[in-house]
Image (cartoon, grey):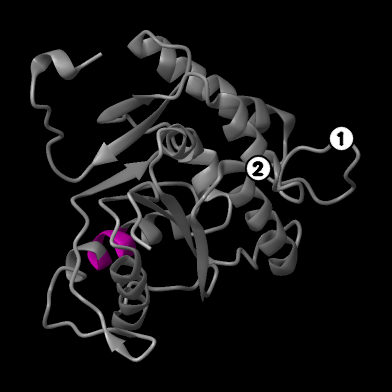
């Protein structure tokens, strides 16, 4: 299966929190979108790897993803080495996405910056035909995504591009709240974390609302880019 967009996150829920609106919008337009989780989030204070597996599957169904995979790197301890790069290259070549969305280049959680660089490096290396990878015993073709965009996470980084997600904030929030073990629940007796507060839950919506305000729409999501963003016509800008 060929994908139009592959969103990659260090942990299950990274994608939902940061770019689920864009995915939902493009899926509604007939695009095929998938998610690759690098780890199972097993070091998270709340929940467990098994619970988060179930939550990730539920979120995928809400968004209508074509595929979701997890390559099981070590939460908190994965590194940007050859072995990890090859694991991601195999997925990129398997699904041949035009666009890859990945972690913030700098963020509070150390895995986010690491995941960002690891994914970016793998996207480049995936285009080198002398790097051989196999799937089901078959040699894979080299493939390099046309674009790599980094979504914004905890830190309020200045976006290079902003995408209107008006009409898709509710499905974004539904996909986020599929991770019931991680986010605000007034009845939960588990340890509090920076993302389990009511304030954080509300911030997901009001950050999208604020970005929308700045571009003259209701809601939006922001991304940073590795190279200049280009348009065919100045009139393509909204």
Q: Report, in whole angstroms, how far the alpha carbon at label 2 lies from the one at label 1.
A: 15 Å
State the mark number for residue 207.
none
Q: Is residue 179 left or right of residue 238?
A: right
Residue 238 horizontal/vertical position (percent): 25, 13
Q: Of all residues shown, which one is farthest toward the bottom?
A: 137
Query: Does any portion of residue 85 appear in the rendered image?
Result: yes
Q: Is residue 185 left or right of residue 34?
A: right
Q: Which residue is mark 2?
A: 194
Magenta range: 117-122
Residue 225 horizontal/vertical position (percent): 23, 41
Question: Disc 2 or disc 1, which is closer to the eye?
Answer: 1
Up-down: is 184 above or below 118? above
**Among the 4 quarters of the image, the one containing residue 51:** bottom right
Q: Residues within 10 Å of mark 2 (few under 14, many from 20)?
A: few
Q: Residues within 10 Å of mark 1 (few under 14, many from 20)?
A: few
Magenta residue check for 98? no
Up-down: is 235 above or below 92? above
Magenta residue check for 120? yes
Q: Residue at x 40, y 48 (%)?
A: 32
Up-down: is 94 above or below 188? below
Q: Main secondary structure of the magenta part?
A: helix
Q: Earlier in the sequence, mark 2 or mark 1?
A: 1
Q: Which residue is mark 1?
A: 186
Residue 150 horizontal/vertical position (percent): 33, 45
- Helix, strand, or loop for circle 2? loop
């Amino acid at each position: 299966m060929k994908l139009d967009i592959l969103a990659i996150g260090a942990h299950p829920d990274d994608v939902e929190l940061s770019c689920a609106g864009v995915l939902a919008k493009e899926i509604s337009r007939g695009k095929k979108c998938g998610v690759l989780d690098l780890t199972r989030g097993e070091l998270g204070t709340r929940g467990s790897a098994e619970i988060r597996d179930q939550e990730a599957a539920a979120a995928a169904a809400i968004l209508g993803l074509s595929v979701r995979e997890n390559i099981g790197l070590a939460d908190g301890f994965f590194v940007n080495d050859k072995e990890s790069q090859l694991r991601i290259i195999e997925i990129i070549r398997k699904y041949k996405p035009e666009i890859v969305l990945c972690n913030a280049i700098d963020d509070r959680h150390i895995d986010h910056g690491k995941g960002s660089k690891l994914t970016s490096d793998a996207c480049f290396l995936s285009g080198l035909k002398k790097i051989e990878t196999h799937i089901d015993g078959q040699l894979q073709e080299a493939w390099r995504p046309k674009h790599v965009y980094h979504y914004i996470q905890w830190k309020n980084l200045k976006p290079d591009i902003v995408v209107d997600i008006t009409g898709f904030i509710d499905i974004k929030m539904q996909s986020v709240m599929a991770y019931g073990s991680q986010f605000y629940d007034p009845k939960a007796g588990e340890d509090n974390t920076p993302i389990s507060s009511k304030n954080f839950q509300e911030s997901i919506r009001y950050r999208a609302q604020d970005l929308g305000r700045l571009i003259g729409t209701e809601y939006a999501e922001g991304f940073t880019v590795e190279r200049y963003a280009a348009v065919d016509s100045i009139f393509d800008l909204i």
